[in-house]
Amino acid sequence: MTDDGLTRPETAGIQRAITGSRDATGRLLTSLEGIDDLDVTRPSLLPEWSIGHVLTHLARNADSFVWILRSASEDKQVPQYPGGVAGRSRDIAEGALRPVEVIVEDLRDSAARLDATWHEVPAAVWLGQGFRTDGSPLPCRLLPVSRWREVEVHHVDLGLGYRISDWAQDFVSSDLPHALDRLPGMIEDASQKTALLAWIYGRAGLPSGLVLGPF
């Protein structure tokens, strides 16, 4: 156990994810700078979202993590987005309409604010938490790997050539356990949960038609 109340593996995981998210952001920004005629109104791979929507979401996501961390450092627990789901959607919709250079600069600035915040908050902040948009707890110690996930997954969603196969194994090995932890809650059909557990135990084949709720 370290002085901040975390185990050494937890502390190492936080630092690894901070580095990973920073590197992933750098790759994303470099790829955007390499496109001379980037059209942010072009559809992304996400339904009803343009490239501008995805990039704006990433910027506001970074700001939401800064908000949670700064609040937790003052022993406050806050919702991820001050305006709730409606405010989040409004900010993304309005932000997506801005010129490409403004959107990219916003992404760069918000990422820089988050990177500074990782290192400025006291170590005890990692024991704090905020709340996701569905009201469930969002522990601060999970924010770095969550940010890493946001950047890596949405980089693919942009549809600009970055693929799932480009994900580093360090990211996959870091995030997969967290994704698996949330998997049971994403399956609403109890029979499908049973079928999945039977497959894990090697007692049945991989269940077909598995329906998952949003992550």
Image (spheres, helix red, strand yellow):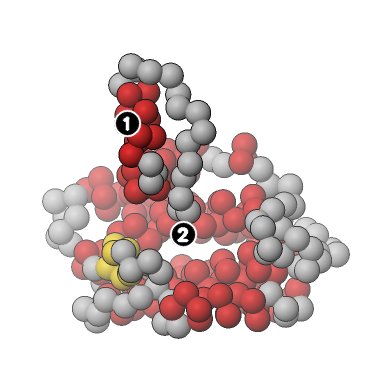
Q: Which of pointers 1 and 2 lies earlier in the amino acid sequence?
A: 2
Which numbered tag is attached to residue 89?
A: none
Residue 204 sits above or below residue 128 on the image: above
Q: Residues within 10 Å of mark 1 (few under 14, many from 20)?
A: few
What is the three-letter code of the residue carrying label 1?
Answer: Thr
Query: Taking 154 as reference, is 99 left or right?
Result: right
Residue 165, percent across and down? 62, 37
Taking the spot 61% from the left edge, 41% from the top edge, the residue there is 164
- Picture quadrant where residue 31 is located: bottom right
**Residue at label 2?**
147
C-alpha distance separating marks 1 and 2: 31 Å
Please state which of the two labelled residues, at mark 1 or mark 2, is closer to the viewer: 1
Taking the spot 30% from the left edge, 49% from the top edge, the residue there is 12
Residue 38, percent across and down? 80, 64
Residue 134 sits above or below residue 211 on the image: below
What is the three-letter code of the residue carrying label 2?
Answer: Arg
Q: Secondary structure at mark 2?
A: helix
Which numbered tag is attached to residue 194?
A: 1
Name the residue nearer the viewer: 138 or 148.
Answer: 138
